[in-house]
Amino acid sequence: MDRRVRWGILGDAAINKSFIPGAQAASNATLVAIASRRPGNAANVATKWGIPRAYDNYADLLYDTEIDAVYIPLPNHLHEEWTVRAANAGKHVLCEKPLALTLDEVRSIQDAAARNNVRVLEAFMYRYTPRWSRAEEMTWDGTIGDPRVVRIGFAFYHDITGYNIRFDPVAGGGIIWDMGCYAVNMARMLLRAEPISVFCAAHSHRGTPVETSIELVLRFPEDRAAVGHCSFDYTNPYSEVEVVGTQGWMSLPGTGFRG
């Protein structure tokens, strides 16, 4: 591109602490504005980070003609609504995972993007790191032989005392949407195929209204498979992605996210 993409952020989320420095340091981006529904909050965040503009509602940011794209780190149940509204305003969208909670929502986003000629991308950040690109290459270049099994494990303990949006079913809470989506996406990318069958066992710790742990098995064509576990109920010091082949295996410790 011959110019910087001008970005706006819909919402003051914790993940912004990672997104904002990255956007401000990128050579092909300019962070223009942030919006929050809490009166005065966007202005405080803008002052803290040196963001030029602040809006007290999301719609006003979308009306800003000097913004090309928006980052959406809103709660899961709001992703479809604001992605569609951003697309209808002619903005490209980078939306946090999961992109949507139902197939109908995905189709709604797809239609809005096509209708308005904009791009919508789900924020699986690891896909663009050199480490992940190398892992994809090594899966298929013969280094480990014929890839047979992808093993994925992610677990981070979260205290269920008090309100936590990850445990709110109305907001799209639960480990499947929070971390399970990573496991499925990683397996599909590494094995370069769509699963032909899915088995998942879900558990809810101490009566929480959403699933807090899962174990899953995905079967792929040519007798390949992915197995994994994701949880809020325990800390897993061995969080990693592995690919097992007929002549060896490859491991990406530390969740496999980092470059």
Image (cartoon, helix red, strand yellow):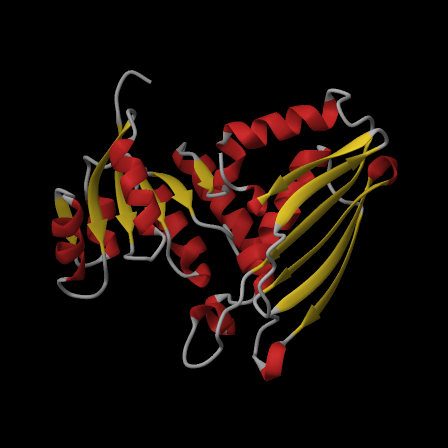
Asked whether the viewer can see residue 6, the reply is no
Where residue 194 sits in the image (x, y, percent)? 73, 40
Picture quadrant where residue 215 is located? bottom right
Number of numbered discs on residues: 0
Residue at 54%, 62% in the rendered image: 156
Residue at 30%, 29% in the rendered image: 26
Q: Is residue 90 left or right of residue 127?
A: left
Where residue 241 sits in the image (x, y, percent)? 65, 44
Quadrant (top left/top right/bottom left/bottom right) for the N terminus: top left
Residue at 46%, 43% in the rendered image: 123
Q: Is residue 35 left or right of residue 91?
A: left
> Which residue is most to the top?
2
Asked whether the viewer can see residue 85, the reply is yes
Q: Is residue 120 left or right of residue 153?
A: left
> Which residue is most to the front?
237
Where residue 132 sits in the image (x, y, percent)? 57, 32
